[in-house]
Amino acid sequence: MSFEENLDKIIQKYKDLEDKLGSPDKMSREQFVQSSKEYSDMTPIIEKINLFLSAKKELLDLETLLLDPEMKEIAEAEIPVIKEKIPKLEKDVQLALLPKDEADEKNAILEIRAGTGGDEAALFAGALFRMYQKYAENKGWKFEILEISTTGIGGYKDASAVISGKSVFSKMKFESGVHRVQRVPETESSGRIHTSAATVAVLPEAEEVDIVIDDKDLRIDVFRASGAGGQHVNTTESAVRITHIPTGLAVSQQDEKSQHKNKAKAMKILRSRLYEEERRKKEMARAADRRGQIGSGDRSERIRTYNFPQGRVTDHRINLTLYKIEEVVYEGQIDEFVSALISEDEAQKLSQIN
């Protein structure tokens, strides 16, 4: 079946849905809701298809006018303009028809851990956490801190947050991986450049309907929370550790004074980790014959380097370097990386269907 024949089938399906919705009394409530959602999801795709097909028809009409001596000059002027537009309109349709990542519309759970590099790695982990906090603020998203484990000099051993807003995961999912920093630490007297790293993980926030967890598969332990240097130690057993027995996944929370709140936060993270694991298995099954695309979340993969002496940030997956490290790290201006990674991901997916 040709590309345009396939488009005709999609248009016909849309018209059939439109006819069905015109007679709601012939459907059950569930069928009406399902058909309405499908119709709504298809509408932006149909709009792109109509623009593409209209441009193709306009081109045919103009080529016909070439035979008319009085219209030939006008047609010759307009044909190149239409021909230039058509490939982009076709690509827009192809992108609209690509299978959607079911998690793209979800909120995201951000987890950052200091890697190799001691105190400097912990300071870098803290800087990354604040970078994403600023990015979320720039996008108008809500940034809710779940837990921060600090070091004595202001670094973060690990930190986590829920980022809520429109299509957060679709923008954040390519940030998963190893981030590396090259700079002269404040504690370094000889001025030598050190290299250290932090690991970023971005998980789609799972709802209870996304993944069912049986209570009998959970082991819940409570203990007293402990703070840095013996400070902020709770005298009650408010800290919670939840272990998912079948997988061995364990999550601890102790930031809240309430055991109930710590348990709720721990369950939120556990549910999202299990959901991400299910997504990863499905993706591996679908793509067994190819290496995962960018943003696969491979934690061993070095994805970005922040070089302070040279003032540059380099994303190694797309070979993009920006010489504005302060704007990126301190102001959260990572949109250029995000847009380029999304475009690369789309290009790879398109190459698999062409």
Image (cartoon, rainbow, N blue to C red):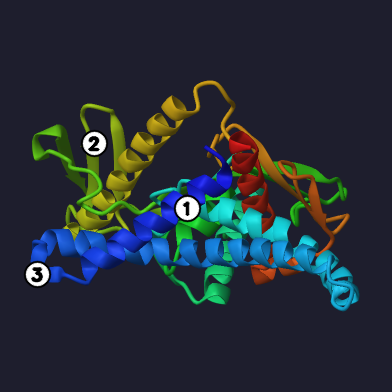
Is 216 or 23 nearer to us in this picture?
Answer: 23
> Spatial distance from mark 1 to mark 2, Cα to Cα?
51 Å
The numbered mark at residue 243 is: 2
Q: Give the amino acid at mark 3.
A: Asp
| Secondary structure beneath label 2 | strand
Please say if 267 is above or below 178.
below
In the rendering, at what x and y percent does residue 247 appear?
28, 28
Is 9 or 318 nearer to us in this picture?
Answer: 9
Query: Mark 3 or 2, which is nearer the eye?
Result: 3
**Label 3 packing within 10 angstroms: few (<14), some (14-19), many (20+):** few
Q: Earlier in the sequence, mark 3 or mark 2?
A: 3
Do residues under tags 1 and 2 come within 8 Å of each other at their CB atoms?
no
User: As drawn, is 38 to the left or to the right of 47?
Assistant: left
The numbered mark at residue 8 is: 1
Residue to which mark 3 is pinned: 25
Please say if 278 is above or below 346.
above
Residue occupying the point 32% across, 42% down: 275
Q: Which of marks 1 and 2 is nearer the N terminus?
A: 1
Query: Mark 3 or 1, which is nearer the eye?
Result: 1
Residue occupying the point 66% across, 45% down: 347
